[in-house]
Image (cartoon, rainbow, N blue to C red):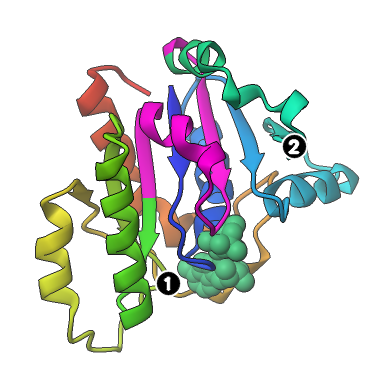
């Protein structure tokens, strides 16, 4: 199964949520988890490397997908289909830019998790990304998740945006709130506070995935 964290809106929370989701899945699922960092900034991979100094056990492998065409495993459709049909869960973290090299992955992922915020820039960017998935005729089920949500703030465009988004995929009801604890995430363990910050939203995502595939994660 392939689950991809993507949107070309930079800083939306893709990497943070991808790491938190990988860690959380390791706690709640028996399936093998592997992450691929497909971002030239290598944020997920570098964090995972840094965590090698940790005393906590390694939870999963993270592989860097290079820029070099020769070592470009996802130019090969067979490889993508292999991952898709596997019992294991493959998580992809993409860059905050659009690139031709992401096309096949965006088309063939089982799920694309799209973090978004309600600022005007983020709303526009999210809609552009949704349109891109449409143009690519992506097979993936779209899962939209409110990221860095500020409880005390009245988002004027929230209602309209929620209606629009819900036409194109599932909108996760529970937001991931803006929380400082998520800024110090590592790839080995969720702290109690971090788990509390993501638990409700991730349980909804897992339920959505299990329902769509009719399997238990
Ligand atoms: N829920 C949250 N609460 C507070 N800070 C957050 C939250 N989610 C992410 N951040 C912070 O926001 C910044 C951007 O997050 P992140 O790197 O995960 O976004 P991204 O979408 O992967 O960015 P890029 O497009 O550059 O890859 C980071 O400093 C991260 O710590
Ligand atoms: Mg990132």
Q: Quadrant of the C terminus?
A: top left
Residue 175 visible (yes or no): no
Residue at numbered disc 1: 148
Apparent side of residue 105 relative to residue 158 in the rendered image (left or right):
right
Name which quarter of the figure residue 32 lies in.
top right
Label 2 neighbour load within 10 Å: few <14, some 14-19, many 20+? some
- What's the residue at 54%, 57% (across, down)? 97
Q: Is residue 58 above or below residue 191?
A: above
Q: Magenta segment range?
A: 85-113
Lateral position of residue 166 relative to residue 195, left or right: left
Please report whichever mark, 1 or 2, sits nearer to the chain's N-terminal start. Answer: 2
Q: Which mark is residue 27?
A: none
Residue topped by disc 2:
66
How far across and how far down the image is residue 20, in percent?
54, 50
Query: How far apart are the alpha carbons under marks 1 and 2?
Result: 29 Å
Identity of the residue drawn at 41% across and 36% down? 106
10 Å neighbourhood of mark 1: few (<14), some, or many (≥20)?
Answer: some
Q: Quadrant of the N terminus?
A: top left
The picture places residue 111, in percent across and down from the top left corner, at 35, 35
Q: Any magenta on residue 47?
A: no
Which mark is in front, 1 or 2? 2
């Amino acid at each position: 199964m392939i689950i991809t964290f993507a949107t070309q809106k930079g800083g939306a929370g893709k990497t943070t949520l991808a790491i938190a989701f990988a860690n959380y899945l390791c706690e709640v699922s028996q399936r093998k988890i592997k992450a691929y960092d497909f971002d030239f900034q290598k944020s997920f991979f570098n964090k995972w490397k840094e965590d090698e100094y940790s005393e906590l056990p390694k939870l999963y492998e993270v592989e860097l997908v290079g820029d070099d065409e020769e070592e470009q495993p996802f130019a090969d459709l067979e490889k993508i289909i292999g991952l898709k049909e596997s019992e294991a869960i493959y998580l992809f973290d993409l860059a905050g830019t659009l690139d031709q090299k992401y096309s096949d992955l965006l088309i063939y992922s089982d799920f694309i998790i799209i973090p978004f915020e309600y600022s005007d820039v983020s709303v526009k960017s999210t809609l552009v990304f949704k349109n891109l998935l449409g143009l690519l005729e992506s097979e993936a089920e779209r899962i939209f998740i409110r990221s860095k949500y500020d409880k005390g703030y009245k988002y004027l465009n929230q209602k309209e945006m929620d209606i629009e988004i819900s036409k194109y995929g599932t909108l996760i009801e529970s937001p991931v709130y803006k929380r400082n604890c998520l800024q110090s995430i590592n790839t080995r363990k969720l702290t109690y506070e971090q788990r509390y910050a993501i638990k409700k939203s991730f349980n909804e995502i897992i339920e959505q995935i299990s329902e769509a595939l009719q399997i238990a994660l």
